[in-house]
Every structure is written in structure tokens, then in C-alpha cells.
Image (tube, helix red, strand yellow):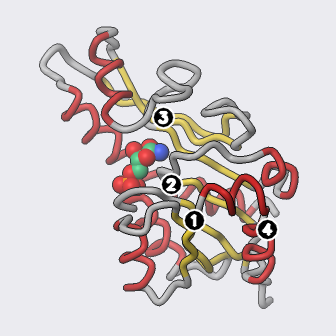
Amino acid sequence: MIRNMKNIAIFASGGGSNARKIIEHFEKSDLGRVALVVSNKKDAGVLDIAHAHQIPTHLIGRADFYESKKILSILDEHRIDLIVLAGFLWLVPTYLIGAYPKRIVNIHPALLPLFGGKGMYGAHVHTAVKAAGAKESGITIHFANEHYDAGDIIFQTTCALTEEDTPETIARKVLALEHEHFPKVVEGLLQGW
Ligand code: GRF
């Protein structure tokens, strides 16, 4: 049976190591493919990764994203079924949440609801985890809503921490979990459709 391939758009602001893992995962899948990469940073490494994989890219500005809703026509043009936020630092506007109900997923490098919310990204997260003396950290994959890091949780997994851990070693442990699980969780969502 020829399944209708689902089209994934990845939104990212940074280096894109998670985007790369997802792109590579779906190059071997008959369920879905990464059809578009969107960024808000013209020099983001994720755009180079997209180009290397011949994936179309789109750069958004604040006015576009929060006022003109132009992104909706871009997503339609690429027949996007699922939006994956992989290190996307802007808040998702309500109109986009409404246009893609339970179709926007985000990954957060901590165990929400702990260590989440505005300003909690990248090293800030792992520094806070270390400062709190947490015995574990981990990842949370959740449906995005109009608040930072607050939508329904889809998947969480943990890694143990020791006194010797630093924010840098915590970041490494967490990123390894992201790379291992994010592609599979996204595939699991597509299987459910
Ligand atoms: C990851 O730590 C992810 O949890 C967070 O942003 C970071 C993206 O890293 N949302 P990369 O650009 O995928 O390497």
C-alpha cells in the first residue's frame, strides 16, 4: 500500500543537530519526509543542513510571523502536515496554533514543568538544573501551545546526574537523549495518523 507521505516542516533558530537527526531519520522512512526548514536567523546552521539535503528553506521575520501570517501560505504551499520545533526560540503565535491543532511539537532539554518557560533555553536550562542540585535531568517532547514549554506532554525520558556534572556535561547527556528519541517520537506521531 502506498501510504501518503506526511510532510514535516522543521522550525529552528540554531545549529540544527536535532533537525539533522530528524532529516536523516526520515530519508529512510515511507511515513514522512522533511519538506521544509524554517528559521528566524539568516545565519543559522540549520539552513546549511537543509541545503545539504536539498530541502527548501524559508526565512521568517518578526513582522511576517506575528502580523502578516504569511507563513500559513508557505506551509500550505509545501502541504505541511506536522510542524516540528527543534530549537526554535520564538513563541508560536496563536493563529498558527489554531491552524495546526495538535500538529506542532516541541522539544525541551529538561523535565517540564520544571526548568521551562520564557528564557529557559540552551545553557540557561542546564545551569538552572545544576544550581538546583537536581539528581536527574532529561528531555520533554510536547505539543506546543501559545505559551513557552506548556503544551500537553507526549514523551519524557531522564538521565542521571552526579555531583561531578557541570552544565556542559548535563547538556551533552541531554542532547544525546534528544538525538536518540526525537526522530522516533515524531515517527510515532505520524504512525498514529
Ligand atoms: C536543543 O537543546 C533543544 O532541546 C532545544 O534547542 C536545542 C536545539 O539544539 N529546544 P540543535 O540546534 O538541534 O543542536
Which circle, 3 or 4, is nearer the viewer? Answer: 4
Counting residues from the start of the chain, the first of labels 4 and 2 encountered is 4
- Residue drawn at point x = 57 percent, y = 46 percent: 90
Q: Are marks 2 and 1 in contact (CB under 8 Å)?
A: yes
Residue 178 seen in render: no
Counting residues from the start of the chain, the first of labels 1 and 3 encountered is 1
Q: Are marks 4 and 2 in contact (CB under 8 Å)?
A: no
Task: Look at mark 1 in the image and give the residue it sits on.
Answer: 10
Counting residues from the start of the chain, the first of labels 2 and 3 encountered is 2
Task: Look at mark 3 in the image and give the residue it sits on.
Answer: 157
Task: Look at mark 4 in the image and give the residue it sits on.
Answer: 72
- Is the residue marked 2 within 8 Å of ligand 1, measured from its CB? yes
Drawn side of residue 156 relative to residue 30, left or right = left
Which circle, 1 or 4, is nearer the viewer? Answer: 4
Q: Badge 1, how many Cα within 10 Å: few under 14, some, many 20+?
A: many
Give the percent coordinates (x, y) of residue 114.
51, 18
